[in-house]
Amino acid sequence: MISEGIFRAYDIRGVYGKEITDEIAKRIGNALAVYVGGEGKTMLVGRDVRKSGESLCSAVSDGMLAGGLNVEDIGVVTTPLLYFCSVHYGKDGGVMVTASHNPSDWNGFKIWAGNSFISMGMGMEKLKNLVLEGKFRSASRGSMKRNLTAISDYIDYVSGKIEIQRKLKIIADPGNGSCCVLIPEIFDKTGLNVTAINAEPDGSFPSHSPEPSEETLVDVKSLVLRQKADFGVGYDADGDRAVFVDDKGRMVSSTVIFIMLADHYLKKNPGAAVVYEVSCSLAVEETIRANGGKPILSQVGHTYIVDKILKEKAVFGGETSGHFYFMDVYGFDDAIFTSLKVAEVLSKKGIKLSDIADSTPEYPRIPIKNYVCSEEKKFLVVKRLAKEFIEAGFETVTLDGVKVIEDEGWFLIRPSNTQPLVRLTVEAKTQDALQRLVGFAENKINKAIKETK
């Protein structure tokens, strides 16, 4: 039996040996061969450092080969590196075996096919049906090869996109995840001095949670202060998310990094498009407009943002969660590239990250409040609230959940894509306005959860 629950908004994911097995991986590979078009096409496959990655990689490859696809294995890499190579080498797509920031007993698949990700609303439903039905065509078996130069090809390309004018000292924590395969070499090649901790890619994430946070960055903060480093950075398990610590040992918000990099790219590309998502700060849109850029609003999630970046030919994009996207690397989110760009900006400006953080406008904000709501009801609750707010005459955005905008601030209500929760994000220009909006939205959410059948 295959659980439909493994097919998520942006990827396929579950506990290895339970929801995700080698047999299911092979079936996903079979289905991908049908989805992509089979014979004559080539898919890359890579994996993060999880111990189940090698067997799952082999199984999904076997399924694709049986369906007539050629497969090129690039080994243990970051997710952004797999995406990069898929486009850079001109292949038909790529499969990354990873469970992103989930614990080490999880695993799954992120899939780039053609010119877009497979996600809900963008092909995941079709792939899921193919996997569940299990009706696969017979084909001449594809060919398999191993690529031993993917990491060096990526390093050569990326280092050519970075201009360091002043040597900086950086503390990096890959958390025993995939970024270990790039550190310290990529920093050395761009002229940066890096001290790495938790840098053994053993796949068990023994040091701390594979998701960077205030809690997991304690050692980074301490080392930044002790070694008088310019900044610190923590990465998630598969290398698509970066969280920063400034030279004073303080965690820096994603809004600060977004504004800093948007300013950098718009000064180089006047009038260019920059993509941001519905939960981003007011300050982000204000910065884009103030720099003469074109703000492009997107749903939350890398699949949707990359799609917008490619369609709008945007130079840059970002999310409040710490994912940043660059046309420099074909529009993908890339944590290593983000940290190198932050270093480039600091080296050129000749100022400290703490100075940028202290001078960047940030409004009072509650990033996320969660409200328990069953899987069956959560989408109905948000749909009901959207209808209620529209009928009441509020300015609303329904691109992703429902966002209500007032002169003093806004709130966003979204169903969680992965848990039985409704999520609330609120931002306002004053603390009083923030509390008023929180109280109003919270009452509406609780009432809707109670009354929705």
Image: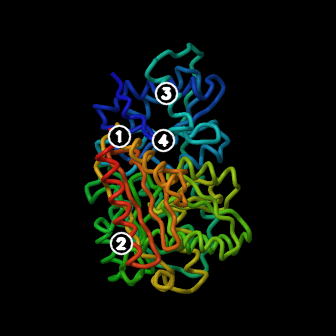
Report the quarter where the C terminus lies.
top left
> Of callouts 2 and 1, which one flags the residue occurring earlier in the amino acid sequence?
1
The amino acid marked with disc number 2 is Gln
Q: Which residue is mark 3?
A: 29
User: Looking at the rendered structure, which numbered label has been put on residue 358?
Assistant: none
Mark 4 vs 3: CB contact within 8 A:
no
Between circles 1 and 4, the one closer to the viewer is 1
Q: Residues within 10 Å of mark 4 (few under 14, many from 20)?
A: many
> Of callouts 3 and 1, which one flags the residue occurring earlier in the amino acid sequence?
3
The amino acid marked with disc number 1 is Lys
Q: Residues within 10 Å of mark 1 (few under 14, many from 20)?
A: some
Residue 166 image point, x, y percent: 57, 82
Report the residue that reaches farthest toward the top.
138
Mark 3 vs 1: CB contact within 8 A:
no
Q: Nearer the viewer, residue 212 or 88?
A: 212
The amino acid marked with disc number 3 is Gly
> Of callouts 2 and 3, which one flags the residue occurring earlier in the amino acid sequence?
3
Badge 3 marks a residue whose secondary structure is helix
Badge 4 marks a residue whose secondary structure is strand
Q: Which residue is mark 4?
A: 110
Q: Residue at x 55, y 29 (%)?
A: 144
> Of callouts 4 and 2, which one flags the residue occurring earlier in the amino acid sequence?
4
Q: Nearer the viewer, residue 62 or 380?
A: 380
> Of callouts 4 and 3, which one flags the residue occurring earlier in the amino acid sequence?
3
Report the residue that reaches farthest toward the right.
270
The residues tagged by marks 2 and 1 sit, at their Cα atoms, a distance apart of: 27 Å
Report the quarter where the N terminus lies.
top left
Between circles 4 and 2, the one closer to the viewer is 2
User: Looking at the rendered structure, which numbered label has been put on residue 377?
Assistant: 1
Q: Which residue is mark 2?
A: 435
